Amino acid sequence: MQTSLKMKIKSYIEVFLDILFDTFIPYRVLSNTRLREWSVPANFIYSYVFNQKFQRLQLLHILRENGINDPHQIKAWWSRGLNNFGDELLAYLLARIAAVECIYDRNKSMLAIGSIIRFARDNSFVWGSGIIREDEIMEARPTCLAVRGPLTRKKMLEQDIPCPEVYGDPAMLFPLFFKPQTISGVLKIQGEPRKPLIIPHFKHDTIVPRFLEYDYQSLLVTSIGDIERVVSHISAAPSVVTSSLHGFIFCVAYGIPVSVFKLKKKGIGGDNIKFDDFCYGVGLDPIAIHEVDTIDKEQIEYLLNNARIYAPNWTPVPLLEGLNEICQTETLSAFIKNVKSGYSCHNAA
């Protein structure tokens, strides 16, 4: 059977499963059961379809614990099926800051975190996503509420797509609500000395070795608990070496010394523009990305010696107000009010 036909059949089955589950699963009832703690092994071909449903149960349970029994719903699209930390952040973020139930939407009503703006449609709202390469061509004219940085905005304007000067990856909002010691069920940070942390891009997960001298954090996640553990590990690390944009972004957000590497023989898609775009968007100069052939102890020590804290000159208020244009809830309004009253133009760690 030809590969293209196999992919089509796989896609049709995926759509069928999505419709089947969303039609017959009473999410708000089952979120009170132990079913929300389940997950399907990643080696199962449709594991991500099942695990997205379990994550929805987990998020509804979190909302209920915070007194939200009938949450507003918002539809959004993200790059699903990779189990990649950055791609899985949006639904969790919206539950925390806006108390909404985020539903995966194949019509791409909203795109946010990550280098996914190229997938937008004419009816899409873009909130904080960006381009993945310098020569990116848009095939649609979405409504831009915010983009990751000025390089993305420049590319939109070159293609006659209106785009405001509102910048920032929404992951930068995490320190405003996520303090690891206050979130139940996450990694408990003890008083013992912490090891430097290695965070490879998810495409590097199997080719970057693990060493006893360093902690290692995989960005392959299948549950809300996994997301919380990754953020907890990063926010508690003394220093970080990473090849992941969101590994870098969370270090910037939490004020953790970080150094970024790039493997010559295994790219992560696109070019370095997404790092530059993010940096410009939060008031930083472009960072040095260290290109290496392989990762060994000597390279890690070199990278750690070049790790530094980045202090962004950025306020989250315009980004949040952009979200408020399409997601008006009392929780989000209160969150924005609190941010305005207590946020300084630096990281919130």
Image (cartoon, rainbow, N blue to C red):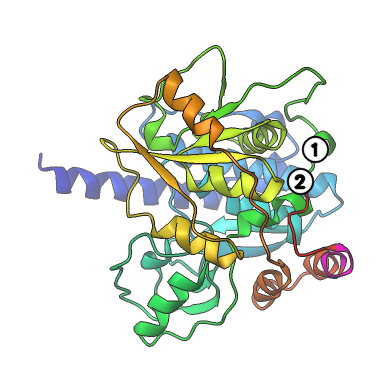
The residue at 85%/49% (across/down) is 66
The residue at 39%/60% (across/down) is 273
The answer to which of 15 and 278 lies nearer the viewer is: 278
Q: Earlier in the sequence, mark 1 or mark 2?
A: 2
- Residue located beneath label 1 in the image: 183
- Residue located beneath label 2 in the image: 178
Tag of residue 299: none
Left or right: 319 in relation to 335: left
The spot of residue 10 in percent (x, y) is 28, 44
Mark 1–mark 2 distance (CA, rounded to whole Å): 7 Å
Q: Amino acid at mark 1?
A: Ile
CB under 8 Å between discs 1 and 2:
yes
- Residue bounds of the magenta highlight: 338-342
Left or right: 150 in relation to 227: left
User: Is residue 319 on the magenta stretch?
Assistant: no
Q: Amino acid at mark 2?
A: Phe
In this rendering, is residue 95 above or below 162? above
The spot of residue 120 in percent (x, y) is 41, 70
* Main secondary structure type of the part rendered in magenta: helix
The answer to which of 120 and 344 lies nearer the viewer is: 344
- Residue 99 seen anywhere in this rendered image of the structure: no
Dot 2, crowdedness within 10 Å: few (<14), some or many (≥20)?
some
- Residue 248 seen anywhere in this rendered image of the structure: yes
Left or right: 19 in relation to 333: left
The residue at 49%/33% (across/down) is 303
In this rendering, is residue 169 above or below 146? above
Q: How many marks?
A: 2
In this rendering, is residue 105 above or below 79? below
The spot of residue 167 in percent (x, y) is 58, 70
